[in-house]
Image (spheres, grey):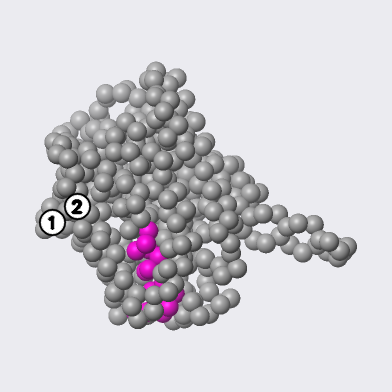
């Protein structure tokens, strides 16, 4: 059993707000989604190697998105301030998420309409622009324009509800937090069964569910909010100094085992979200605990923290780079295994460069300028040296 060496929830100003290990984990999750979407391009001419790639990374995208949803609830709870207001919180989250979404939305729209020559339904584009696309079960809506931005549609609901959710979770007594965590987990495991009540459709070729079942289990924002709430509760468990069952190494081992063995012991619908929820929550909690205790990990290295900081931009760029990169190299072209790996590495590098540019010259400047309101000028004469502006919260482990 592992416990924190301090109790941040009662430590007031002593809480360590920065969680570098979780920042590093963000990039691992974003890379997992990248490798998942590579699978659909069928880069490998050798069908056996393509099948092995699909067997390894065929569910890594589900893992990565689930990690981000749980992490979002965890980090927002960890960094929540007693002096904050709902409007200030919403302002920070808007300027963290929406400018990047708008930029990549426009990039995807131009590529699809001008390069691919595809007509985009204006209604679908508007739903995507407003981040409400995940509320619709049709793939042509929830995967429109920059297709991976459906997850931001879920995050928008999470942020809208967070002030109420955190107030409710704070009312849970510390000794009951684990019980409530398992209640939420039970809800996550109930979702695949509830999806069976939806109108019948044939199963998708690439997923263990029909279109409407896949939407309900994986896309539907109120359902995915269970992951977010789990993150809130687990953050409170760590903040309250409650004991964790596993160290970071043990939690990672459990996550790897669940990923590998889950499809062998549970029906396919449970592998989309449910099987990984607890292991991922434990990895996040154990990583935060290690950071609080001052334990250096490779995840908290300078390189991994930098990669984690650009991971949101990486996530928003990667699908476009993979799709149109393949198109530029030959839309239906396949390569021998070494060359295919080289193509994947090239597209990964291009995505990294674009992510660095978006983060450095768009995301970070906007956050610095707009995330926190500027102070009103003082009513009385200002002193010779003006007080510094309030710091923008780092939130370095959240999207």
Question: Considering depth in this image, is 102 or 283 the residue closer to the camera?
Answer: 102
The answer to whether the residues at label 2 and label 1 have Cβ atoms under 8 Å apart is no
In the displayed structure image, the side of residue 13 where residue 309 appears, left or right? left
How many marks can you see?
2
Magenta stretch secondary structure, dominant = helix
The region drawn magenta spans 228-243
- Of residues 228 and 257, which is closer to you in this image? 228
Residue 251 in view in this figure: no
Residue receiving disc 1: 266
Q: Position of residue 53 (x, y in %)?
A: 21, 42
Q: Callout 1: few (<14), some (14-19), or many (20+) C-alpha neighbours within 10 Å? A: few
Residue 69 in sight in this render? yes
Residue behind mark 2: 194
Residue shown at the point (13%, 56%) measured from the top left: 266
Q: Residue at x 31, y 53 (%)?
A: 223
Q: Position of residue 154 (x, y in %)?
A: 39, 48
Q: Is 338 a magenta residue? A: no
Residue plotted at (35% across, 42% down): 135
- Residue at 39 percent across and 30 percent down: it is 124
Q: Is residue 117 above or below residue 396?
A: above
Residue 56 place in picture, x, y as percent: 21, 48
Residue mark closest to the camera, 2 vs 1 = 2
Which of the 4 image quarters holds residue 89?
bottom right
């Amino acid at each position: 059993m592992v416990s924190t060496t301090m109790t941040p929830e009662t430590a007031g100003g002593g809480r360590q707000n920065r969680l570098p290990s979780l920042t590093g984990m963000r990039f691992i999750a974003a890379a997992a989604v990248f490798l998942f979407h590579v699978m659909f391009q069928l880069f490998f001419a050798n069908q056996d190697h393509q099948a092995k790639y699909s067997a390894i990374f065929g569910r890594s995208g589900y893992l990565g998105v689930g990690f981000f949803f749980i992490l979002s609830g965890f980090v927002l709870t960890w960094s929540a301030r007693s002096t904050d207001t709902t409007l200030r919180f919403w302002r920070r989250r808007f300027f963290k998420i929406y400018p990047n979404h708008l930029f990549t939305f426009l990039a995807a729209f131009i590529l699809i309409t001008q390069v691919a020559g595809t007509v985009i339904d204006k209604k679908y584009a508007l739903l995507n622009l407003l981040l409400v696309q995940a509320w619709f079960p049709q793939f042509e809506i929830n995967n429109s324009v920059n297709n991976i931005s459906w997850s931001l549609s879920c995050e928008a609901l999470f942020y809208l509800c967070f002030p109420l959710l955190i107030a409710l979770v704070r009312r849970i007594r510390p000794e009951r937090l684990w019980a409530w965590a398992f209640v939420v987990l039970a809800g996550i495991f109930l979702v695949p069964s509830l999806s069976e009540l939806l109108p019948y459709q044939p199963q998708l070729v690439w997923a263990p569910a029909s279109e409407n079942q896949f939407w309900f289990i994986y896309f539907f924002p109120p359902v995915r909010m269970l992951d977010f709430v789990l993150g809130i509760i687990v953050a409170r468990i760590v903040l309250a100094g409650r004991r964790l069952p596993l160290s970071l190494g043990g939690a990672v081992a459990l996550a790897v085992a669940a990923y590998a063995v889950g499809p062998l012991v549970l029906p396919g619908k449970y592998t989309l979200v449910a099987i990984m929820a607890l292991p991922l929550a434990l990895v996040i909690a154990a990583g935060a605990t290690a950071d609080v205790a001052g334990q250096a990990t490779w995840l908290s290295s300078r390189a991994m923290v930098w990669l984690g900081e650009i991971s949101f931009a990486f996530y928003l760029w990667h699908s476009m780079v993979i799709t149109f990169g393949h198109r530029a190299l030959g839309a239906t072209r396949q390569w021998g295994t070494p060359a295919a790996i080289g193509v994947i590495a090239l597209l990964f590098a291009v995505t990294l460069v674009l992510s660095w540019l978006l983060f450095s010259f768009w995301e970070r400047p906007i956050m610095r300028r707009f995330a926190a309101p500027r102070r009103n000028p003082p009513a009385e004469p200002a002193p010779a040296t003006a007080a510094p502006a309030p710091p923008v919260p780092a939130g370095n482990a959240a999207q």
